[in-house]
Image (cartoon, coloured by chain):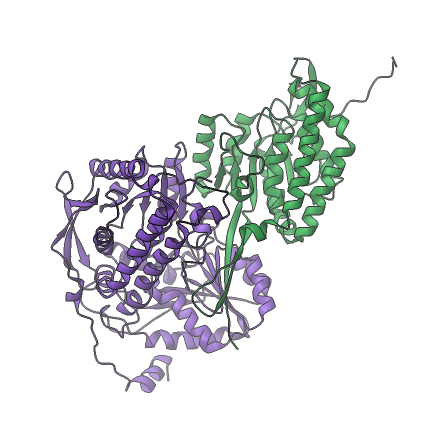
Amino acid sequence: MSDRLDVRKTYKLLINGAFPRSESGRSYEVTAAKGEFLANVAQGSRKDIRDAVTAARSAQAKWWNATAYNRGQVIYRLAEMAESRRDELAEHVALSEGVNARTSQKTVSASIDRMVWYAGWTDKIAQVLGGTNPVAGPFFNFSIPVPSGVVGVICVQESSLVGFVDAVLAPICVGNTVVALASETRPTPAVLLGEMTSSSDFPSGVLNIVTGITSELAPVLAAHEDVDGLDVSGLAPEVADEMAALAAGSIKRVYRPHQKELESSLRRLRAFVETSTVWHTIGQ
Amino acid sequence: MSDRQLANSQLGSLEYDPAPESAAIAKLKPSYGLFIDGKFSEAEGGAQFATVNPANEEQLSMVAQADAVDVDRAVSSARRAYDKVWSKTTGAQRSKYLFRIARLIQERSRELAVVETLDNGKPIRESRDVDIPLAAAHFFYYAGWADKLDHAGFGVNPKPLGVAGQIIPWNFPLLMAAWKLAPALAAGNTCVLKPAETTPLSALVLAEIVEQAELPPGVVNIITGDGSTGAALVDHNDVDKIAFTGSTEVGRMIQQRTAASHKHLTLELGGKGANIVFDDAPIDEMIEGIIDGIFFNQGHVCCAGSRLLVQESVADEVLRRLVRRVEQLRVGDPLDKNTDVGAINSAAQLLRIRELTDFGVSEGATRYTSSCELPQKGYWFAPTVFADVSQSHRIAREEIFGPVLSVLTFRTPEEAVAKANNTNYGLACGVWSEKGSRTLWVAERLRAGVIWANTYNRFDPTSPFGGMRESGFGREGGRHGLEAYLNV
């Protein structure tokens, strides 16, 4: 065994393409599933959430105005990065979720396959959810799905990687930008994936990740007036109810998962798109 | 010569003789009960209230005031009908019931148009040519979906939600009832519909039509009442779905109240639509489009083009022609077939319009109001245009829901988009330009659920309608409208 001391990583936030410690300077201790010390992870603050929302808002128009083909390439690139760093992801899944190496490798494979699935959706969703409408008059009328805007995601606590990938890539692939509150107890796989986005041509601000105490940060995200949609998957039902009520303040779209959401369901993709319908006159 | 004098000198000779539709065609009854379980019955407590003609403040009829007990009766009836009958009725049969309703609306269209105009105050030309035909068309459209749900894009055999509670506004009473009932029934739900307090009558005629169509009792229940009736429906535990059209303020409250429940929710709320006019737009059509965008239905339209954004280079000319056109609008008896602008729906709404327009003046905008003569009785507001409006003015930010247009200017397409999107609402916008590429560029950037290019205020059952942001969520119309009533 080598007596070299390993260089340990600081687990930081991802806001606007940068990796700040929390502006509050706080961190909290994250332990592996078996109880041993894993990392001191940045403990995000209300201000970090607001900064992340600002970043997501500024990035949204650019992300949506990129071609659907380009958005697909970027998400596919993330899958490539994840594949090449799969052992690192697997190690953190194993530590976080308390599963053996074999299971964690399977989890990583599943999450990468989800990324590929979403990468393929970017330039198909408009054809599936949109279309032309045969109105009774001299008009060309078409409906297209457009993103809700900025989506706040409160990630599931247990599934540290697959759950995270589904929750953030569904809104992102249809053109939203995201502020994700990572699993409080198992944040490191999400942080790793966030790092990978910076080598995947993700424009800054498209995915922002805040780690910290869910009960402290979720209400800030739920009540933020510049957030258009809220995914409350990571909350216990009573807390999700409370957050959904806060979200009503600015008429946010709220996504709550079905008991058994099918992987192939479009519900997640539909949750944060708006149908925009254009009427144009036809004439000589 | 002022514009008004100019208009009068040119058009003074064009007087129209009155051409009123007969109010007797409405065949109104002295009182109406609640339509629950296929029968009309009095409210449990016996309470009633009057519905008046806003054009002359005369009482039209008495209707029942449903309380929580009545709401419970209606919901129980809908639940029974869902469990015992409607959930076992095939799509093909539901389809045929809906086709029957569509035909019955067509058959009774003249009566319905007069009822609508009497109760709402809108011009008969609009109720006859827009509200009633579109209501029938909506039932026709969704009738055809009832047996084709497998192909609607939500997977095979999509399930209904159950009992739908539907609360509708007073601006398009029958049309909104059709928008709510038709997709809900096609998808296999049963319904409790609550029309607005000030416009209950056309929904009650629709209840008679439901009877004539021989829908199984309880599939459609129609209960009249005020806000407390709506609140009782929203709070009822056995309702699976709430669909609400109305103000953002009430919508927000409903979203909060249903947040901790199993209830599905769709909201169609307020708006402050921008109508964007570029300097190359064909001016005659554009002026008519602006007029239609704001004065259609006295401006009681959530998607009204209440903010006119006009490119600076043509602003003076557009404003001049607009003011002249406003002066020519015929305001008066809604039953007269020549009337363009009818009565404001209620005293409360008139008060709100007056309050907000007073702010327009006190905040420094320039007011042009039609010099038309207003009837002595009833609720009336002369068509009004405000120029020199800035984005911070209340008349540019708040929904007035009346015949009041605010005019702002812009220089570049970027500025037009920024100003159009500078609102918490996101329901509808208009774009006027001969340049297709620019129209599409603008449309792509507008945060609105509906965008009309070189037209305004068009509706069709095949075309999804609904808002973004604080204008609500969910769509009505088209394939998309089914999603609001399916468990998918």
Image quadrant holding the N terminus of chain B, namely: bottom left
Q: Is residue A100 above or below residue B464?
A: above
Up the image or down, A284 lies above or below B429; here it is below
- Horizontally, residue B383 falls left or right of residue B448, namely left
Instruction: Give the residue at x 25% y 53%.
Output: B213
Residue B460, image x, y percentages: 41, 61
Q: Quadrant of residue B348?
A: bottom left
Residue sitting nearer the eye, A244 or B321 = A244
Q: In this figure, what is the number of numbered marks?
A: 0
**Residue placed at 74% from the left, 42% from the top?**
A77
Closer to us: A131 or B98:
B98
**x then y, percent, for residue B466:** 44, 53
- Tell me where residue B389 appears, x and y as whole percent: 45, 63
Q: Which chain is green?
A: A
Give the answer, above or below, for where B65 lies relative to B364. Answer: above
What residue lies at 42% left-to-right and 45% top-to-bottom? B484
Residue A241: give x, y in percent of width and height.
Answer: 44, 30
Is residue A205 visible in the rendered structure shown here?
no
| Residue A156 visible in rendering | yes
| Chain coloured purple in this rendering | B
Residue at screen point 58% across, 71% down? B435
